[in-house]
Image: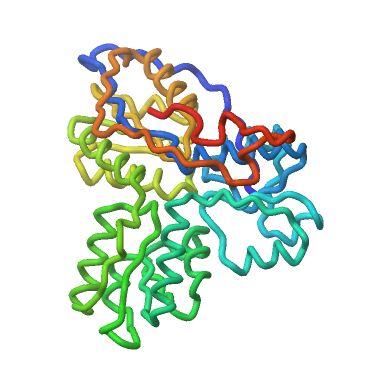
Amino acid sequence: MPVPRIPRRREPLKDIAGTGQKRVLLASPRGYCAGVDRAVIAVEKALERFGAPVYVRKQIVHNIHVVTELEAKGAIFVEEVDEVPHGAHVVFSAHGVSPAVVNSAADRGLRAIDATCPLVTKVHREAVRFARDDYEILLIGHVGHEEVEGTAGEAPDHVTIVNSPDEADTIEVRDPSKVVWLSQTTLSVDETMETVRRLRARFPELQDPPSDDICYATQNRQVAIKKVAKDADLVIVVGSANSSNSVRLVEVALEYGAKAAYRVDYADEVEQAWLEGVETVGVTSGASVPEVLVQQVLDDLAAAGYRDVEEVRTAEEDLQFSLPKELRTDAAGKRDDRALGGRSRA
């Protein structure tokens, strides 16, 4: 696991005169989605219910702050289940795992808790279904991403990964009449549809998934930052470097008119030079980012004169997912009050 970075102290951001009317456009929705909330609470509940340590395969969600906080509570993050002691509790991350990982955990006698986002599970089931019908599955996603590895692992003999729109021009298939596309849930909507367009130009009978694979939260955060970006001199995206949806938000902001856009894990990474000549700052965060990190950015910007904060809301989110079945009751068998859903989201 990566070594957590401790936020460093730096000189406070300065309020530079002559910049003009300063304001912040705060994108909403932003931050935690239902799947992330469920996964983080699952680790917290497992620690409460079973005691430390509880092992987690990979990062439970792609945010270094969340991982660091859970480590402080007794979670131990590992790369693979063979690092987990026999018989221990292990949580599978929100990104999902392949059947091979599930089987490996069972072989070691591990007590597994599956915190896979239900929207990722849906894509897994689609892969199984289409493989059963002998379709070739073109999985649009990033090679090496945990979610892609898990989905591909459901039907390894039927899946070909398409890493970018350009790769769509070179992919070969066995039978062009039996091809379907699926996608990683956290991609750029625009880039994914461009990949699909180019695939369909080569394979006119390409089938669509039965429902949209890119998750509602990813789409909503991209729609919100598109609206903010056109009026922003600078966009700040709070999120970790290994968070696909956070990285995409930076790209979308630039594509839709922001003059500059940067990703930060913590407020202390915002640089004074970024604010030179900037009147309007757009702020958002990826789907695995707790709101406290966004508030710290807003506090620092306020110190630099950006005290006028306008929320730009493009959708309402009220989706909640039940916790994994092992965590819906307490040790006495009483239903836990957090069995459904969790924290409020922006």
All told, the count of numbered labels is 0
In the image, residue 49 above or below residue 160: above
Give me the residue at 26% from left, 76% from top: 169
- Residue 193 position in % (x across, y down): 24, 60
Q: Which of 189 and 170 is in front in this view?
A: 189
Instruction: Pick whichever, 82 or 256, lies toward us.
Output: 82
Image side of residue 198 versus residue 157, left or right: left
Work out whether 185 lies above or below 31: below
Q: Residue drawn 30% across and 41% down?
A: 220
Identify the residue at horizontal 47%, vertical 35% (top origin).
289
Q: Position of residue 16 (x, y in %)?
A: 32, 14
Q: In which quarter of the image is residue 4?
A: top right
- In the depicted structure, whether residue 179 falls above or below residue 104: below
- In which quadrant of the rendered view does residue 131 lie? bottom left
Image coordinates for residue 323, horizontal then vertical, percent: 56, 42
Against 110, residue 262 (above or below) is above
Q: Where is residue 340 in the image (x, y as percent from the top left)?
A: 51, 36
Q: Which residue lies furthest to the bottom in this view?
A: 174
What colour scheme governs how the chains and residues are painted in the rendered image of this protein?
rainbow
Asked if residue 120 lies left or right of residue 307, the reply is right
Quarter placement of the C terminus: top left
Left or right: where 45 falls relative to 178 = right
Front one among 252 and 262 = 252
Is 189 displayed left or right of 267 in the figure?
left
